[in-house]
Image (spheres, rainbow, N blue to C red):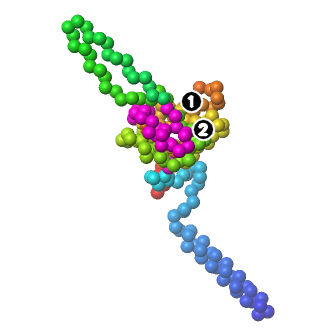
Amino acid sequence: MKNYIDFVADASWNTLKGLWVTLKFLFLPSITVQYPTEKIVPYPRFRGMLAYDAELCIACGMCVRACPSRCIALAKAAPPPAPPPAADGQPAAPAVKAGPKIEWYTIDYGRCNFCGLCEESCPTKPKAVWHSLDYEAVFSTREEMVRRWKRGDGPWGTVKRSADAQPSAISDQIHIQDMPVRK
Ligand code: SF4
Ligand code: SF4
């Protein structure tokens, strides 16, 4: 009989201890999030999906050389045409001073190891290529892993859904920066 009473007392004490832990955390703010409707915004130094600004880029190729995985490629745009010759007696039109620009730029996420060296080596201020806070990306084909940019494209670039498809804008990726910051 004594053993039985000891057993009941012990079990009751342990149950109360467990309930006390539950009670302690019941009124604290929750730590878990309701993913995917709620997302945690990473710290600012987080290295997420790369974004790129074709207007800022000066096509210097530093990121291509810095990348240890050889996943960046670019082509420099042809220089703008020379100004027309001056008409008789008229001063020549001043040449438009424009830095080099890209024809196209690609990043292959199938090879990228998110090391950040491309961003570090980029000489523009602000950086023309940089890690966003975005940690969500889904690829269903090898082709989709290659992001492509031309001048006028947004920071997320475009993607070819299959080898013979035309590049289309990224529309199905959720960008963490767009999510409300969790308080
Ligand atoms: S993060 Fe590293 S591996 Fe990825 S593109 Fe940049 S330099 Fe290359
Ligand atoms: S992204 Fe930066 S480092 Fe790469 S080519 Fe453009 S300016 Fe140069």
Q: Is residue 95 magenta?
A: no
Q: Residues within 10 Å of mark 2 (few under 14, many from 20)?
A: many
The three-letter code of the residue at mark 2 reads Met
Furthest-bottom residue in view? 2
Query: For residue 145, which numbered disc appears in the image?
Result: 2
Identified at 39% across, 29% down, the residue is 100
Mark toward the viewer: 1 or 2: 2
**Ligand 1 within 8 Å, label 1 CB:** no
Q: What percent of the width, then of the height, locates residue 43?
A: 47, 55
Q: Quadrant of residue 130?
A: top left
Q: How many marks?
A: 2
Q: Measured along the vertical axis of the image, is residue 59 above or below residue 112?
A: above
Q: What percent of the width, then of the height, locates residue 137?
A: 58, 43
Q: Is residue 167 or residue 30 the one in the foreground?
A: 167
- Alpha-carbon distance for marks 1 and 2? 13 Å
Identified at 63% across, 34% down, the residue is 143
Q: Earlier in the sequence, mark 1 or mark 2?
A: 2
Furthest-left residue in view? 89
Q: Main secondary structure of the magenta part?
A: loop
Q: Is residue 65 or residue 131 the one in the foreground?
A: 65
- State the extent of the magenta-drawn residues as a range: 47-74
For the question of whether residue 127 can be seen, the reply is yes
For the question of whether residue 178 can be seen, the reply is no
**Residue tagged 1:** 168
Q: Is residue 52 left or right of residue 13?
A: left
Q: Measured along the vertical axis of the image, is residue 168 above or below residue 18?
A: above
Query: For residue 142, which numbered disc appears in the image?
Result: none
Identified at 66% across, 83% down, the residue is 13
Identified at 56% across, 70% down, the residue is 25
Considering the numbered disc 2 on the image, is that residue within a helix, a strand or a loop?
helix
The three-letter code of the residue at mark 1 reads Ser
Q: Is residue 72 magenta?
A: yes
